[in-house]
Amino acid sequence: MKVFKNIVNTIINILIVLVLVISVLVATLALTSKSSGVSNIFGYTFQVIMSDSMDGGSEEYDGGDFKKGDVIIGKVTKNDKLDNPGTYEKGDIITFEGILQGNDHLGEQLICHRIIDVQDRDGVLVYQTQGDNRSVSQLPDQGDVSEYITAYDIVAIYDTADFTGKKIAGVGKVYEFINSQLGFFLCILLPMIIFFLYVLIKVVINFVEFKKAKDDEKRGADGSLPQMSAEEYEEFKKFQEMKNAQAQSDAPSAENEE
């Protein structure tokens, strides 16, 4: 029975640790994305793919092939904090904050596309991007094409000469749900409340067991507690007298109520 109890406690503890780790991870992603526009965990970002513009990948270049609902793990850039930002090449897959041609109604958004053109304009490199999947575009002859952007607009990289990210297929909806108010409560706040209640109950149980163990240590060979000292006995008598007096004072009031 004791072995079974230990196994159950171990499983519960493992589940609690996993829930806490996931909760802290998601909370950190949400907080960093709100403050900087892109989530950031130790220099890496988790991005939910919102369209099929990169579905199928490219015949000319490696990487890509993202479907709507996939999550990609990229590397956060620091171009906005550098006087000489990084340089990128044709074929690189990057994430930038911008507006696609023909999609102005969507406003500013994070877009993960492939660089299709690089130009030097008065010593400043500018980049044009496009989705690999031309069939989903509102501009059939061009595909999802961006305006020319600079390195300062690029917030993360996914596939370059120096870095290749990872793709987690089909978990985007789960990630989006966790980031919603209901998802945050059910998946983060509620598990943390349950965890703290569990810890509180464990503390109370351990305190009771510790007190019982101390009492057992004080018991004599016959199982009785040691005799009280004279001072303790006097204090005990006073307590009993106060208790009896309180009982007597409460008795008439009980009769009057009847």
Image: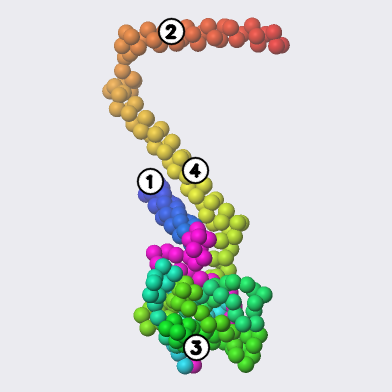
Counting other residues with Cα less than 10 Å from the Cα at mark 2, is it few (<14), some (14-19), or many (20 or more)? Answer: few
Numbered circles on residues, count: 4
| Residue at numbered disc 3 | 116
| Residue at numbered disc 4 | 197
Taking the image as shown, residue 250 lies to the left or right of residue 218, namely right
Which secondary structure is most common in the magenta stretch?
loop
| Residue at numbered disc 2 | 238
Residue toward you, 130 or 196: 130
SS class of the residue under badge 2?
A: helix
| Residue at numbered disc 1 | 2
Instruction: Point out residue 96 in the picture as x, y percentages from the top left corner.
Output: 51, 75
Residue toward you, 98 or 254: 98
Which of the two labelled residues, at mark 1 and mark 2, occupies the earlier sequence position?
1
Which portion, as a residue range, is magenta? 30-59
For marks 3 and 2, give the CA distance. 92 Å
SS class of the residue under badge 3?
A: strand
